[in-house]
């Protein structure tokens, strides 16, 4: 019996890992990965303590490998996030067992599995690390991503958990009712897939010519400090090349310039806009001076390093006209999670999200990991954003799966908000993504490239954009009903 339990948990772990680890990268494997764990959870002979240890082992292995890219960044941060995410599996399966132990109806039991996953996702969304970990096992199919416009992608993940639970019940019970429930959830998943596959590609009013500049400069701090002249010349050469194509808007990635360039950086970026003959957006990690009000970026930056003391930095995007005039500025509203633990200067954020007005419509900026958080893109669109610009820097992690997973986040933000998303990074992949999440153009990893595209302005919303928590509210009502029913039966 112990051997069979080990085989079940090992099977789940292998299927989950095959979803993102090269060379397998079988993203559809997770649609069956939780079946063995559900078989354990629904087995009355498997004691709760054994269920806890088996699911904890799977959770630690899965999230440990999924987050391994963090080891190149900060080992303490990796350990902390793993400590938070690792127990998610045992919390979920033990809670499900307790909530459904008196349920004999297979349909209700399988439905509870999906709704509880969605409810737990909502709890984790309140933490600094967000809730992506509850969605990643089900990434892979653009057709399934389309459901994000209705429920957010967590709706697909919840359906996946219900399907896994239904299949496990059919294995354990082997009754026609249990098989019928498994067939129902299989048909629901197939229906969502084919609905997304056949959803019409939008034809927005195009006409805005954009250029995304991926300069492929190294991220290494020592290299940056030693090569400011090379950085300047690379930027100048690329924007001059862009200017020969006469785009309307040029996007430069989020890139931390060396300290020696901060004195006079605004003038340098202004000159780049003039050289490109276009409107230009550039982003960097810029110094912030102390203020009684929410953090702000001083203008100009001249001499700020000597004046700022311990003030810190902020991810900031600056918007310039073709004449070099700075006409807009955006400071990130979300810092990196647990940034206080990092041995760096404090990272400041703005209190309220602000869009940038442009001749092409309102621009919504997503800096660094803000595009991983659906709520930031939601705020941007509520503030009137008609195009989303995702400026990030994953250069430190090009040898991992993170850049590809980060691109998926931008696809989901495009679908959730029905907006074009222009993603630009220093080392790739940069991409032009339409409101259906389709990647129209994409650069490679570790290459110098310029993407030219024509995009449009979108003003329509989605159900998810208008009511982002409707499914979570339904999930909590369902879970509360089960908990209340258990209390009544106990009395």
Image (spheres, rainbow, N blue to C red):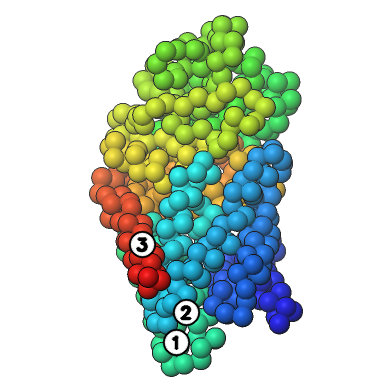
Mark 2–mark 1 CB contact (< 8 Å): yes
Circle 1 packing at 10 Å, graded few (<14), some (14-19), many (20+), is: many
What residue is shown at x 60% (from left), y 26% (from top)? 256
Q: Secondary structure at mark 1?
A: helix
How crowded is the residue under tag 2: few (<14 C-alpha within 10 Å), some, or many (20+)? many
Q: Earlier in the sequence, mark 1 or mark 3?
A: 1
Quarter of the image with the N terminus in it: bottom right
Q: Which mark is residue 483?
A: none
Mark 2 and mark 3 lie on one chain; the one further toward the N terminus is: 2
- Do labels 2 and 3 touch, CB within 8 Å? no
In the displayed structure, 35 sits above or below 24; it is: below
Relative side of 391 to 466, left or right: right
Coordinates of residue 332 in the picture (x, y in percent): 45, 30
Q: Going by the image, does 337 lie left or right of 325? A: right
Q: Is residue 328 visible?
A: yes
Frontmost residue, 476 versus 482? 482
Q: Residue under label 3, please give it.
A: 480
> Residues under labels 1 and 3: Cα distance?
24 Å
| Residue located 37% across and 70% down the image | 491
Quadrant of the rendered image containing residue 426:
top right
Residue 157, percent from left and from top: 46, 64
Position above or below: 54 against 328? below
Residue visible at 34% across and 39% down? Answer: 379
Q: Which mark is residue 178?
A: 1
- Front label number (2 vs 3): 3
Q: Residue 451 location in percent, x, y?
A: 50, 42
79 left or right of 386? right
Residue 140 is situated, as x and y percent measured from the top left of the image, at: 52, 63
**CA separation in Å, label 2 and label 3:** 21 Å
């Amino acid at each position: 019996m112990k051997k069979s339990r080990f085989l079940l948990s090992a099977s789940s772990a292998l299927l989950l890992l095959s979803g993102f680890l090269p060379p397998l990268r079988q993203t559809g494997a997770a649609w069956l990965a939780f079946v063995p764990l559900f078989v354990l959870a629904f087995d009355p002979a498997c004691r709760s303590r054994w269920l806890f240890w088996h699911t904890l082992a799977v959770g630690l292995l899965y999230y440990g490998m999924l987050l391994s890219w963090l080891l190149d960044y900060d080992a303490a941060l990796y350990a902390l996030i793993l400590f938070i995410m690792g127990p998610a599996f045992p919390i979920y399966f033990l809670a499900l067992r307790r909530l459904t132990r008196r349920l004999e109806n297979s349909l209700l039991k399988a439905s509870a599995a999906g709704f509880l996953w969605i409810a737990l996702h909502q709890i984790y969304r309140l933490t600094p690390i967000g809730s992506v970990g509850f969605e990643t096992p089900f990434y892979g199919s653009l057709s399934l991503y389309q459901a994000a416009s209705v429920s957010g992608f967590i709706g697909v993940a919840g359906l996946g958990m219900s399907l896994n639970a239904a299949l496990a019940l059919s294995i354990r019970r082997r009754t026609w009712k249990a098989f019928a429930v498994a067939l129902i959830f299989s048909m629901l998943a197939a229906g969502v897939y084919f609905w997304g596959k056949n959803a019409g590609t939008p034809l927005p009013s195009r006409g805005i010519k954009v250029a995304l500049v991926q300069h492929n400069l190294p991220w290494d701090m020592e290299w940056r400090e030693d090569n400011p002249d090379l950085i300047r010349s690379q930027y100048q050469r690329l924007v001059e090349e862009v200017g020969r194509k006469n785009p309307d808007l040029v996007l430069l990635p989020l890139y931390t310039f060396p300290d020696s360039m901060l004195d006079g950086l605004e003038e340098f970026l202004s000159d780049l806009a003039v050289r490109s003959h276009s409107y230009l957006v550039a982003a960097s990690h810029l110094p912030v001076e102390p203020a009684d009000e929410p953090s702000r970026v001083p203008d100009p930056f001249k001499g700020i390093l000597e004046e700022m003391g311990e003030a810190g930095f902020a991810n900031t995007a600056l918007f310039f006209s073709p004449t070099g005039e700075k006409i807009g500025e955006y400071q990130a509203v979300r810092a990196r999670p647990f940034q206080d633990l990092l041995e760096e200067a404090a990272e400041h954020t703005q209190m309220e999200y602000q869009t940038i007005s442009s001749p092409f419509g309102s621009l919504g900026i997503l800096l660094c990991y803000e595009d991983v958080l659906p709520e930031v893109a939601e705020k941007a669109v509520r503030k009137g954003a008609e195009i989303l610009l995702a400026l990030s820097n994953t250069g430190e992690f090009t040898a991992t799966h993170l850049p590809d997973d980060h691109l998926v986040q931008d696809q989901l933000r495009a679908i959730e908000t029905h907006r074009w998303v222009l993603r630009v990074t220093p080392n790739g992949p940069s991409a032009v993504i339409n409101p259906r999440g389709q990647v129209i153009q994409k650069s490679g990893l570790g290459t110098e490239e310029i993407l030219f595209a024509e995009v449009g302005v979108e003003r329509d919303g989605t159900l998810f954009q208008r009511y982002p928590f409707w499914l979570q509210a339904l999930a909590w009502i369902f879970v509360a009903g089960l908990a209340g029913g258990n209390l009544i039966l106990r009395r």
